[in-house]
Image (spheres, rainbow, N blue to C red):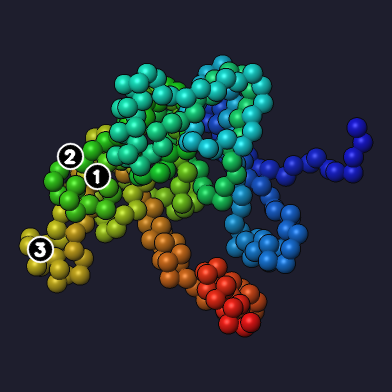
Amino acid sequence: MKTNISMNNTLTKLSEFKNVSTFQVLEYEDLKGGTDVKTAFMLSYMREANIKLRQLRIVLSGGGVYTEANALSFMRGPIEVSTNTGGLFSLSKKFVSSKISGEPVIKPHFKGVGEILLEPSFGHYALLELEEEEIIIYDSLFFAAEDGIEIGISSMKTVSSALFGTEGLFQTKLKGSGIVVLEIPVPETEIFKYSLVDDVLKIDGNFSVLRTAGIQFTVEKTTKTLIGSGFSGEGLLNVFRGTGEVWLMPTKVVYDRILTEGLSFGVGGMDNMMGDTWKKHPREKEADHKEEK
């Protein structure tokens, strides 16, 4: 078949982990598919801000992997797809765990020989390989894992962490051997990894990525009394204590603030080009239209 379309896909392999299966993080060089002014402007702005589209590719060589629900883009080869429901009792336990942890109850399982590509995202991916290890991750970071990894929940061990912590009552626990993929909201260059040896780490905010099983999580006052903590302006701190690793993403609070408070794009920026209309809720736009009539 002849065509005028060039099939030279411009993807860069950012990272790769090999075990039973191979996991690759791919990045698109540029997006040029804008067919209207608004989309073209957004793509231009993203290009200047160096925001890139990424995609996870998994090459199966007879092994199996779990992925987040609804994450599949396409797959090639004799790959069987099943779910991790088990029997009725097992499904009930998974349903309860899902309601507690916030993770979807059904995770598709892919097994066979071929390749799987998950949906592209502007997020960032962290590849980890566990060797009979256990990690506890921040909610909603799980993206994929080899089926040698057991996916469960971890409850807060202390009253203070349950009542005053911002990490939630339960978190996702990953245990076993195999490769794990996390979708993280910041680039890998903005991740701080601390190795603690019978030590303590205190943070003011909710920006931890993961901790290993040897780390205990509590919530503590900055001073000896709650009144003193209030006057200090710091209040309560998330405290990680023990021996193991803690990963932090301190820049997450900045991105969260940008999303909630917004930033002015300045003269000639998006605010001026699109006007105030693009910011309004659809019902507000409809009301404006009726007033004009």
Viewer-nearest residue: 191 or 33: 33
Q: Earlier in the sequence, mark 3 or mark 1?
A: 1
User: Can residue 101 be seen at all in this image of the molecule?
Assistant: yes
x and y, in percent, of residue 115 in the image: 63, 27
Task: Identify the residue at image location x=32%, y=39%.
Answer: 99
What's under tag 1, amino acid-wise?
Answer: Leu
Select label 1 or label 2 by which is in front: 1
Q: Secondary structure at mark 1?
A: loop
- Is residue 142 found left or right of 173 in the rendered image? right
In which quadrant of the rendered image does the C terminus lie? bottom right
Residue 60 quadrant: top right
Outermost residue toward the right? 2
Relative placement, left or right, of 4 versus 64 is right
For the point 30% across and 27% down, which residue is it?
Answer: 93
Split into 4 quadrants, where in the image is the N terminus? top right
Q: Which residue is mark 2?
A: 157
Q: Is residue 259 left or right of residue 117?
A: left
Which circle marks residue 169 in the picture? 1
Q: Dot 3, crowdedness within 10 Å: few (<14), some or many (≥20)?
A: some
Q: Which residue is mark 3?
A: 226
